[in-house]
Amino acid sequence: MTAPSDPAEAAVRAAFTRDSASRDLLVAAAERYLLAVFPGLIGLEQLWAHYHPGIGRTTDPLEHTLEVFAELDLEGLDERDRRTLLWATLFHDVGKVRDPHSRAHARVSVDLARGPLERMEDNASVRHDALRLVATHDLLGHFMQGHIDAQDLLGALDWDARLLELHLRLAGADIRSIRGLRDIVPPSRLGAARVALERALVQAAEHGGPAGAL
């Protein structure tokens, strides 16, 4: 692996791999990177839930991603998990450059993120887990709407408690940053979803594995 030569890649890598990086530095590095590498995200109209009354339009995917960074809970994470969560947040919606309304954008985001992550992240495990989080970041919303059950979501995360925690942090920040969902999905509902998923994970362990979870 070679170090990224592009200044925007170098800047975001430096910020994301520095434990002491402030929230402002993380957001600034993410913005610089997305502007340089995914300029097509700028100005894209998103689904109605992203409508921002203060600007009279929906936020575009770049603006939205920066708002997710602002909501992201990084407290208590070790260095590896922190980087995993930051990379996943950076890339979670880049697939919208192809179609901002597509419900398959997570899969496209994974495809677009794979090459840049190879250049910017040395740890293969971090890259793998970050891509898994990108691929699954909409599943918490689907679970809360009853479109999938706990086994579906946990199965997509390999029944891994660590990945579940990181998923809840990314998906929760994603939901909280969408203005049209704030009243529909208050913190109490997010908390209840967390409890239900964590309980299902414990039940699976008690019954010897996913097959006997529920």
Image (cartoon, helix red, strand yellow):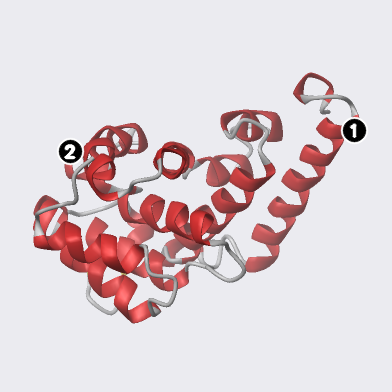
Judged by depth in the image, the label closer to the viewer, 2 or 1, is 1
Q: Which residue is mark 2?
A: 98
Answer above or below: position of 105 versus 176.
Answer: above
Specify the amino acid type for callout 2. Arg
Q: Which residue is mark 1?
A: 206
Q: At which x and y percent is residue 73?
A: 54, 68
Which quadrant does the C terminus fall into? top right
Which of marks 1 and 2 precedes in the sequence?
2
Answer above or below: position of 146 versus 23.
Answer: above
Residue 105 seen anywhere in this rendered image of the structure:
yes
Q: Is residue 126 left or right of residue 12?
A: right
Local packing at callout 1 (Cα closer than 10 Å; few below 14, some 14-19, many 20+) is few
Q: Nearer the viewer, residue 22 or 213?
A: 22
Q: Which mark is residue 99?
A: none
> How many discs appear?
2
The reply to whether discs 2 and 1 touch (Cβ–Cβ < 8 Å) is: no
Residue lying furthest top = 211
Residue shown at 25% from the left, 63% from the top: 12
Local packing at callout 2 (Cα closer than 10 Å; few below 14, some 14-19, many 20+) is few
Q: For residue 105, which quarter of the picture?
A: top left
Q: For residue 147, which quarter of the picture?
A: top right
Q: Nearer the viewer, residue 10 or 39?
A: 10
Q: At which x and y percent is residue 36?
A: 10, 59
Residue shown at 39% from the left, 78% from the top: 23
Specify the amino acid type for callout 1. Glu
Answer above or below: position of 191 versus 29.
Answer: above
Q: Is residue 65 left or right of residue 83?
A: left
Q: Is residue 197 left or right of residue 62?
A: right
Residue lying furthest front = 2
